[in-house]
Image (spheres, helix red, strand yellow):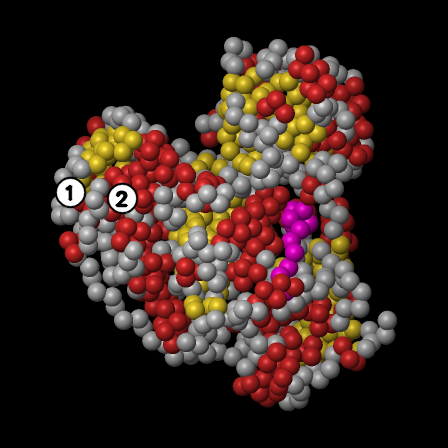
Amino acid sequence: MKSCVIVFPASNCDRDAASALERATGKAPAMVWHKDAELPSGTDLVVLPGGFSYGDYLRCGAMAAREPIMRAVKAHAEKGGYVMGVCNGFQVLTEAQMLPGALMRNHDLKFVCKDVELSIANSNTAFTSAFGEKRSFTIPIAHGEGNYFADKDTLDRIEGEGRVMFRYAKNPNGAARDIAGIINEKGNVLGMMPHPERAADPALGRMEGWPMFQSLIEAVG
Amino acid sequence: MAYDPHMNPPGSPEMAAEFGLKADEYQLILDRLGRTPNMTELGIFSVMWSEHCSYKSSKKHLGKLPTKAPWVICGPGENAGVIDIGDGMAAIFKMESHNHPSFIEPYQGAATGVGGILRDVFTMGARPVALLNALRFGEPGHPKTRRLVSGVVAGIGGYGNCVGVPTVGGETNFHPGYNGNILVNAMCVGVAPQDKIFYSAAKNSGDTIVYVGAKTGRDGIHGATMASAEFDDASEEKRPTVQVGDPFKEKLLIEACLELMQEDCIVAIQDMGAAGLTSSSVEMGGKGNVGVELDMDAVPQRETGMSAYEMMLSESQERMLLILKPGREHIATRIVEKWGLDAAIIGRTTDTGRLVLNHKGQVVCDIPIAPLSEDAPLYDRPFQYKAKRPVLDAASIPAPKDLGDALLKLLASPDVASKRWIWEQYDRSVMGDTVADSGGDAAIVRLHGTNRALATCTDVTPRYVSADPFEGGKQAVAECYRNLSAVGALPLAITDNLNFGNPERPEIMGEIVGAIEGMAEACRTLDFPVVSGNVSLYNETNGAAIPPTPAIGGVGLIEDVTQTATYRGMKAGDQVLLIGETKSWLGASLYLRELQGREEGAPPPVDLALERKHGEFVRTQITAKRVSAVHDVSDGGLLVALAEMAMANQTGLNLDAAPGGPAHGFWFGEDQARYVLTASPADAAKIAAEAKAAGIVCAILGSVGGSEVSGAGFTVSVTALSKAHEGWMPNYMSGAA
């Protein structure tokens, strides 16, 4: 699998994502600068990493979503390429309108960093197939604006289409219907607030996020 | 706009006093210059000679601290201390206070404290890998405390989370002695290759001086002077001297500087921290014995009409000063612009040894640099050691009605209660190398791409330092050593953040001298030198000083990240061992304060030879992988330490050990040099045998199992312990407690 990580100003999980991808695929991903207009040729997976792109100024992800590289990311997704947005990356994907809804301030207005249990609402996707029979896993969250919001019709629709991927077992941020991650209609673009890349390291004994990378490797073939 | 002479009037004794200079210090400036300084020059003298920048009251005694060891690459005097951690790598770290601004404006004060300490570390070429913070607040019931806690914690998180450096540890105390002066001490640890460490000394004349980062505004003017004075009722009017942080810009600055350091173009680099452009340019010139000439019109400015005085004294954040090799300016400009930051050539080094400032066609400052940095006045202030407090016999201190209730009260007391409410607001796992974070003895951060790790923690017990500055200073260093040892790290070096009241009072100066002498003895015996630090004096309001608080930040090395221990990990059936002797020391203890309402008695003495011996023993047992969990015994004594382990594992303990002497003294006494270890029965036997052979006191306290912590006279469920321990802080912050 050929992967790349987009680096926005003040992305701060770009190195973490790259390390996890390198461990999972055996190959270091390309680091793509936000001002570039194109992705490396042959890219299978684009990761939009966590962080505080543009300092979260204006709205989280709003400025990053309008960067030149995002046109290339959209084109990649339209061709069926995989895109995974984690934390700030999820915020960028909603701002770029590649995923529905928005991420608002946490309900208690505080940043929260802790391990959370996620139930796997759909394990029949390119991002989750390797979980197999497993119905839940526990990985860290670290965000101040992870309170997922969409109107009722949208929520009903994405739930009905099996596009809610992960739900919090115990809602940490006020997210509508406990939603922690969703996919697009085609099933090739994922946004999620929790950090699988921080739980994909055998040396630290944290492997709960590993199946997500395994799933993608299998999907790409 | 043309030059306006009214913006730079001649100095006067009144102006000097307003800038915080004493009359004799002003006279000294007149003598050194042989003329009357103008306002810009006087402003520069006043900040460079402030307590904050010059260490004029503490320098004489700071010299008593050991600063050398074979593994010390750079000790105090640079932006941060540097130690050898093997494999050609160095750890670079420092702790610094932001007390005064945090009291006045908690969010920005704390946030810019984090920003400042980050810059001290990456200025030297290190990528910051861990942040810690040592916080002291007033009593919980004080009307300002809740707002200050909330603001400081949000500020630390707001800055650290955005720059993407994990906040992995620290400590928080509450005491009425901090009602008028909270303490916010931020520590940063970074890692750099030893052949890419950058220093601040200019080297040659004729090099280009480049300004990088945020534009200069009028914020923070005379911040260093504010930090060198007591507070009174009007102090909140000083809000305009608090700076405003921009962590987004800091993150870009980190990446731009680290990228620039890969190129061969930097001669020297210094962040603009306290006293901004003044201290950075004066220190770079002073250390290199060269002059500095700046074109103030070229300084990037956020506001119009700024005078040279304002620009030199501004403490606007996220700014760096670089001296570049001639002909390499274009490389710097390219990298800085890539990261979207401003860069401007603002001057050059000269061979005159003078600081010359040109503004709007006029020379607005022309003074020799040496008197500013090296010849700042030094004081040998009179001091008076504190009278020793009497030693209290445990039998003379009332026992609680119920040991279990006493344990629950201690666990729910503000100093012991879980600080989860605080640390869950900090990103602790970004960078992907956090092995252990808040809640345990020391945090563990893996060295990226290796299987080695650094351990780090902050420690001081102000109760003890108040009772006996010398023993308390010793204890702060010893506890830091113990916390690092408890996770299996070899303690290497410390940074210190000395927070005290007004040094012009002999009793306060006595606390400073006593604490430094105690720390020095501990550092020597434990081979644990001081490599960096910061002194914060005048922490007083209306004449009331804070408890003496010399916060110690330690760094240790773990050779193999699979050979560590934390206070988590014990298993049912394990045996519980206690290393070290229990003499039921209740003087200055938390039991005495929280359950008897008394802050009395001599603190526990620290036997440094024993600390070293026990630390080495525990590290050996961890490396041999014989232990399932380790915890040091500190605040609240043995039973609190055991309860913390039980809660961390959600497992009970059967403690059948028979206390020698009064039970409350045995369980809540705070004797030093003690560790609790858990191990399988087979490993426990080996540990006990080795301890015996080494002449180390080692007792088996009981075994792990069940859902209760029980012993003679007490049985408490782990659920009840957790409820008490976890409950206090969220209840308090929501206004319920």
Judge by depth and name the residue closer to the eye, B498 or B720.
Answer: B720
**Quarter of the rendering containing residue B405:** top left
Where residue B659 is drawn, which disc sits there?
Answer: 1
Give the residue displayed 53% in from the left and 42% down from the top: B426
Q: Disc 1 or disc 2, which is closer to the eye?
A: 2
Q: Does residue B724 appear in this view?
A: yes
Give the residue displayed 57% in from the left and 47% down from the top: B154
Q: What residue type is labelled 1?
A: Pro
B295 left or right of B434 in image = right
* Callout 1 touching callout 2 (CB < 8 Å): no
Residue B212 locus on image (x, y percent): 71, 56
Q: Is mark 2 on a helix, strand or loop?
A: helix
- Check the image and name the residue furthest to the right: B1
- In this view, B620 is above or below B298: above
Decide: few, some or many residues near mark 1? Use Cα within 10 Å; few <14, some 14-19, many ≥20. Answer: some
Look at the image and give the residue range highlighted in magenta.
B241-251
Q: Does residue B194 appear in this view?
A: no
Residue B122 locus on image (x, y percent): 59, 52
